[in-house]
Amino acid sequence: MEYAIDIKNLTRNFKELTAVDNVSLTVEKGELFGLLGPNGAGKTTIINMLSTMLKPTSGNATVWGADISSEPTRVRRSIGVVFQGNTLDDRLTGRENLDLHGRLYGLSKDLRSERIMEVLELVELSERADEIVKTYSGGMMRRLEIARGLMHHPEVLFLDEPTLGLDPQTRNHIWDYIEKLNREENITMVLTTHYMEEADSLCKRIAIIDHGKISALGTPTDLKAQLGGDIITLTTATEDGATGLLEVCKDLNLATDISISGSTVRITVPSGERAIPQFLNAASGNNIPIESVNLRKPTLDDVFLYHTGRAIRQSNVDEMDRMRFMMQSRRR
Ligand SMILES: Nc1ncnc2c1ncn2[C@@H]1O[C@H](COP(=O)(O)OP(=O)(O)O)[C@@H](O)[C@H]1O
Ligand SMILES: [Mg+2]
C-alpha cells in the first residue's frame, strides 16, 4: 500500500446536482490532510463516500489499502469518523457513549474498559467520564466524539468540520488535540473545514474544493506563495477614482494580479513595502486621492478568492454556525 488514501475520479450525483465532481487525490500515511471549502462544496459527501456511508456514482477510492466499493467492511475496520454535528447520546455519560461504540465494534469488555481509559486520557476527559453528556460544554462534547472515533485504534481518522460552531478559544483547544493525535499516535487524518485559519494552522496539505471540484492542492505555504507576493489594497473616495487608479497601477507593470471591487483596488506584488510608494506617487500624479492603504501577506482566503473568484465570508459563516449549533443543542 503506497498511500493511506487513494481517490480516483470520484463523483457523486444527487439527481441533477453533481455534489462531487471527478475528484482525484492521494493522502500520505501519517499525513494531516485538509479539505477546505464553503458550505455546500461537497466535503461531507466526500467523507461519506470514503467512510462507506454513501456509494459513489462513479470513480473509486482505496482507504488503507481497501476498496470503498468492494471491501467496505475492511475499510470500516481501519477508519474512525467524527461526524459533522453532534451525534452523542446526551442522556448517557461520557463513558457509556464510548462503551456503546466499543460494543458496536465488537470489542471485548476488558478491551473496552482499557481503551476507554486511554482515549479519555488523550482528550483529558477522565475526570468527567461518569457525568451525563448533557452537562458537557460544546468543546467537551467534541473531544468526546474525537475519543469515540479513536476507540478501535483506527489507522485513518475522518473529522468532518471538527470545530463547527465552537468559540475561537475552544477551537484552538481542539486543534491542539488533533495535532497531538496526529503526531503522537501517528494517525492519518483527513479533516474538512470552512475555517481558513484551521486549515492553515493544522494541515500539512490542503485541497481547496468548490462546487464539488478541487481547484487547488498543496501545502498552505506553497498555495499562498503561488499568489505571487503581498497584497496591497488602495481605497479611493469614489468608484470612478478606483477605475482610474486601476489603469494607473496597471501602467506601472509591478503587479502580478490586480482587481477592482467598488472603490477598492486590490494589487498583488512581490514586495509590498517597495511598491506602495510607487503606487501612491502615480495616484497623486494623476490627481486620484487615496483614502486608505493596507498591506498584508496573503491568507488562504486570498488563495480561495484567486482560484474561485469568490470569498468565503468568514464572519457570516461563523454567525450561521453558532446559530445552527445553538438550535441543535436546544432541540435535544
Ligand atoms: N442526501 C442528499 N440529497 C441531495 N442533495 C444533497 C445530499 N447531500 C448533500 N447534498 C447536496 O450536495 C452538495 C454538497 O453537500 P455537502 O457534501 O454536504 O457539502 P459541504 O459538506 O461541503 O457543506 C450540496 O449542494 C448539498 O445540498
Ligand atoms: Mg459538510
Image (cartoon, rainbow, N blue to C red):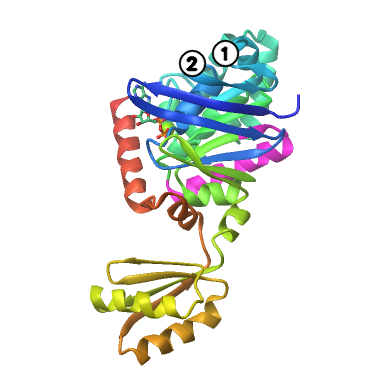
Residue 223 in sight = yes
Distance from disc 2 to disc 1, alpha carbons, whole Å, reads 7 Å
Disc 2 element: loop
| Segment tinted magenta in the rendering | 167-189
Whether the residue under disc 2 has CB within 8 Å of ligand 1: no
Name the foreground residue: 67 vs 59. 59
Give x and y (percent) for residue 122: 65, 34
Quadrant of the image containing the N terminus = top right
Give x and y (percent) for residue 34: 56, 40
Q: With 331 as the anchor, is 78 left or right in this view? A: right
Q: Quadrant of residue 158?
A: top right
Magenta stretch, main secondary structure, is helix
Q: Quadrant of residue 203?
A: top right
Up-down relation of residue 217 to residue 26 (above or below): below
Residue 236 in sight = no
Label pair 2/1, CB-CB below 8 angstroms: yes
Residue that lies at the very extreme toward the right in this rendered image = 1
Name the foreground residue: 106 vs 313. 313
Say whether residue 181 is magenta: yes
Q: Residue 55: which disc?
A: 2
Q: With 297 as the anchor, is 184 left or right in this view? A: right
**Ligand 1 image-quadrant field:** top left
Question: Residue type at mark 1?
Answer: Ser
Q: Quadrant of residue 329?
A: top left
Question: Residue type at mark 2?
Answer: Lys
Quadrant of the image containing the C terminus = top left
Give x and y (percent) for residue 328: 32, 30
Q: Which residue is mark 1?
A: 69
Disc 1 packing (10 Å; few <14; some 14–19; many ≥20) = some
Disc 1 element: loop
